[in-house]
Image (cartoon, rainbow, N blue to C red):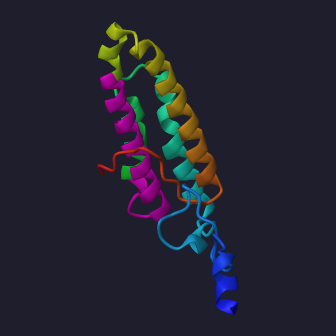
Amino acid sequence: MSEIAIMSNPTPFEPNKPYRTPSTPEGDVSMAGTYSEEEKNWSLIAHLSPLAGYVVPVPFFNIIAPAIVWFLKKDTLPMVDNQGKEAINFQITLFLAFIVCVPLVFVFIGIVLLPLLVVYGIVMSVLAAKASQEGRLYRYPYTLRLI
């Protein structure tokens, strides 16, 4: 009879296991927050540098900027290695989505999708930067992992 009582009241979380959000790392969640301030700041720069592409009129700046940060710091700072790749992959995914949306402007669907794509890119970059500043590894949703 005690087995029935246990099975009728399932708990969704194990008591000693932390809750995983989409931005927690795939590995050990207890590692969150153990990164140095330098790692957090460079990861923040990797996530926010593509936003400067809205001001700097350089083609592909949104991909080049996090790639420079990643290339310079990947060997010395493990968090920047992870988050730099995430930022680059996200920006490549946004670029591919942009390529798909441009011809859709002629069918009027792209007129709605392009501004939504821009807003999505800004919001996700800010969320990733916030997570990096807190010392959490962020995983962008719906992103092709190419690097």
On the rendered structure, is 50 left or right of 144? Answer: right
Relative image position of residue 90 (x, y in whole percent): 41, 42
The residue that appears at 65% across and 75% down in the rendered structure is 10
Q: Which quadrant of the structure image shows residue 81?
A: bottom left
Quarter containing the N terminus: bottom right
91 shown above or below 128: above
The residue that appears at 63% across and 69% down in the rendered structure is 12
Relative image position of residue 16 (x, y in whole percent): 67, 80
Specify the farthest residue to the front: 1
On the rendered structure, is 40 left or right of 103? Answer: right
Q: Is residue 112 visible?
A: yes
The residue that appears at 66% across and 73% down in the rendered structure is 11
The residue that appears at 54% across and 27% down in the rendered structure is 119
Nearer the observer, 91 or 144: 144
78 shown above or below 47: below
Residue 42 part of the magenta segment = no
Q: Main secondary structure of the magenta part?
A: helix
Relative image position of residue 89 (x, y in whole percent): 37, 45
On the rendered structure, is 72 left or right of 28? Answer: left
Q: Is residue 77 visible?
A: no
The number of numbered badges drawn on the structure is: 0
Relative image position of residue 131 (x, y in whole percent): 61, 52
Nearer the observer, 143 or 53: 143
10 shown above or below 52: below
Residue 94 part of the magenta segment = yes
What stretch of residues is rendered in magenta? Answer: 72-100
Nearer the observer, 11 or 140: 11
Q: Which quadrant of the structure image shows residue 110?
A: top left
